[in-house]
Amino acid sequence: MSTDPADRAQAAPDQEGPARVLRVAFVPGAMPEKWFGRYRERTGQGLTSFSADDPVLEVLAGRADMALARDPREDDSLHRIRLYDEAPGIAAEKEHVLALLKDGEVVDRADLDGETVLLDAFAAADPGEVREMLQVVATGAGVVLAPRPLLRALNARGVVHREVAPAPGAEPTTLWLTWPKDGDDELTQELAGIVRGRREGSRRSALVEDETPKKKLSAREKTLAKQARRQAENGGGGRSGKSGAKRGGRPGGPGNKKKGGAGKSKRRR
């Protein structure tokens, strides 16, 4: 057997390789399964996902096709779709007074006066840095401010977390979908459409077998189509079928007119 790659390509030109599986890296705290499930359901294509502290780096390194990232750096070579803003959160050791608040109650900023803030990760939420600092929080040394979904995902032992009111004028952390422009294809566009909320029946997808737009009929073509449907309903009789129905004695047919006419002439006499 030849070992020349060109010969091998010519020997089996019609063989299909394995279908490409979309690879998506996502930052801790993202919850993308609803989108991934819709992608698999609509397309029948595979999708693999994994958590990464810097998912954009995974894309740039070629280990992922797309990334769900928290406030990714701007790059002209990347597409970016803004998904949603995250609620801010605070983490404290489990014996802290904040643990008395029910999950869902929001901590007022004024209640943080006098607290030792070990890390304020709202501006740049580095999951690795937050993960390490939460170990210090568990000792009671202070509190950490970070996106609430990130604190929930890390779930550090000996630490509680609650939502905190946003700081005046502070921008929220935001989740984005991003991928290389030179890696744009029908698979990436499919997931992009899903996260945008495009419905299945209205989506424009290269994965749909028949997306040829239907020809718009002219007024004459519509009239001819209606006539063809009527002929089909009458058994293909055309005009003769219609006249035959009239001769069959329908109300208003020739036979009724003649009889009615005779009745009128008798009354005139």
Image (spheres, rainbow, N blue to C red):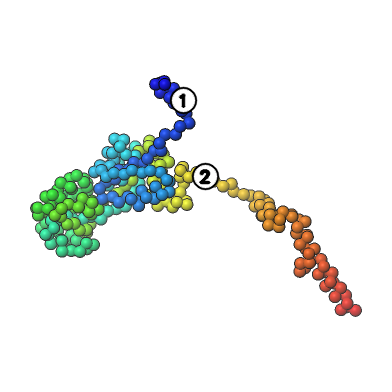
Q: Is residue 102 left or right of residue 262?
A: left
Of the residues shown, which amino acid type is indicated by label 2? Asp
- The residue under label 1 is which amino acid type? Ala
Closer to us: 148 or 240: 240
Check disc 2 and report its element: helix, strand or loop. loop
Among numbered discs 2 and 1, the one appearing first in the sequence: 1
* Residue displayed at 29% across by 44% down: 50
Residue at position x 30%, y 37% from top?
63
Alpha-carbon distance for marks 2 and 1? 31 Å
Q: Secondary structure at mark 1?
A: helix
Image location of residue 96, percent across then percent down: 12, 59
Residue found at x 41% / y 20%: 2
Question: Taking 8 as reference, is 24 above or below it?
Answer: below
Residue nearest the observer in this picture, 268 or 50: 50
Mark 2 neighbour class, 10 Å CA radius: few under 14, some 14 to 19, many 20 or more: few
Reading the image, the residue beneath label 2 is 210
Left of 209 or right of it: where is 176?
left
Image quarter hosting the C terminus: bottom right
Q: Number of marks in the image?
A: 2
Q: Is residue 45 left or right of residue 244?
A: left
Mark 1 sits on what residue?
11
Closer to the camera, 16 or 107? 16
Q: Position of residue 125 (x, y in %)?
A: 22, 47
Question: Can residue 21 be seen?
Answer: yes
